[in-house]
Amino acid sequence: MSDLQKKLQEAYNSVSMPPDLKKKTLEYIHEQTKQAEPVTPDQTEPAVAEDAPLVGDMQVVPGGAVIARKRKRSRTRTLALSLAACFILAILSFGGVRIYTFETAYVGIDVNPSFELGINTFDTVVSVQAYNDDAQKLLDALDLTGKSYDEAMQTLAKNKEFSGYLTEESFMDISIACDNARQYQALQETSESYLAVLPCEGVCHGVSAELRAEAHHQQMGVGRYEIALELVELDPTLTMEDCQSMSMREMRNRIAALLGEDASSSSSYGWHHGEGQGQGQGQGQGAGRHR
Amino acid sequence: MREKEDIEDKITRFGDAVWRACLLYFRSGPDAEDAFQETYLKYALSKDEFSGDQHIKAWLIKVASNQCKDMLKMASRKNIELDDSLESHIVAPISANEQPGSLYREVLAVMRALDDPPRTPLYLAVYEGYTAQEISEMLDAPVNTVYSWISRGKQQVREALS
């Protein structure tokens, strides 16, 4: 047991539930479940008849209660609403360009090339960012911006240079940072269908904005950063800089060897071909992008 | 709703674990007690079926964590100073010479000061003994992400305690 583990164990072993908390909790549960009774018909509010007498803006209902009545919408109000709608449309038109270029999701791809695609709300690639020389060379030769994510992945699949990295021995990590459930699901489905036709193993998963920021601080793709953290933890002789030059497969094999596991198994890693887990919590930022 | 005897049994067997999970988020006894009670109320009302004790314990810890986070979001309150009610739950010092009560408080305070994650994954891994795979299922996060949380959390706690 490490020193840290020992300290945490001893600290938390010293903490126990207050002796009276059990009794208080049972009483609380009893009170809460006793109060949760269905409303009886005579406890509901009286219905309002259409012909109930009016008193100014109020309406008298059976039983003598007075409630606010609904007023008919005036023509002036309708005109005001129409003008407001036109104004909003004008704003949206000017803002449309901004919306188009604003990244709402980031898809990181790590094999040995490590790069990231910035995706807008229409699932279109609006920016690309390379994290190593192999990726920079690849992205310089391709024009992925302006393509839908699906088209961008097909372009990559057909690219001879990128295909050279995707052998049976290699591994591709696709990470998605996105806080919109619809978009995340769409990107995940596209990614997994792409992984399914590749000769290499791969995984697609969600990542948080926080993790993405940490990875970029280290000038790494998110997938590479995650596995590098794990490898460095297991082998302190390695540094994050060492991991920069390793392929995903190489790092994965080293981890498996250190853990005494079969690198191709799907044990504690949960790494299956095309399996996605969780949902990212990324936030579009879009600063310093290569467009 | 579950039987009273069942609820009482789960409080007896897993109450300490749930209490500790609540103390990951709250320093004040009343706040942690509220979260504790709400957690068991949810257990009482839930229709989930469990595959065993470990499943129940993991469910309770997860619900307690979510409850605490919801309470913090709603109240947006800051942690108050360590009060008597928390100190009274720190028992059995190892050695009076080391003033372990203060050491324990320091460790607990360091853990509470961590962002979450990595606070909860680190606690689940190092204290409760869950594997990264189990934690990934509890927190609905990828296994690799859990590994990075645990690694980062350990580093931060070591730096804070050094």
Image (cartoon, coloured by chain):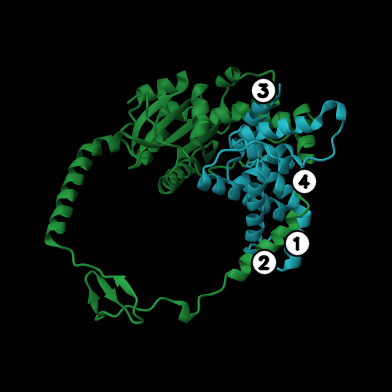
Chain colours: A green, B cyan
Question: Residue visible at 29% across and 38% down?
Answer: A99
Inter-mark Cα distance, 2 to 1: 12 Å
Q: Position of residue B23 (x, y in %)?
A: 67, 43
Q: Secondary structure at mark 4?
A: loop
- How packed is label 2: few (under 14 Cα within 10 Å), some, or many (20 or more)? some
Disc 2: host chain? A
Foreground label between 3 and 1: 1
Residue A173's x, y, as percent?
A: 53, 34
**Residue at label 3?**
B159
The residue that label 2 is drawn on is A30
- Which numbered disc flags the more N-terminal residue, 3 or 1? 1
10 Å crowding of disc 3: few (<14), some (14-19), many (20+)? few
From mark 4 to mark 1, how far is it between C-alphas?
A: 16 Å
Tell me the residue that label 4 is attached to.
Answer: A16
Kindly indicate the quadrant of the structure image that contains residue A237: top right
Q: Which residue is mark 1?
A: B8
Query: What residue type is disc 1 on?
Result: Glu
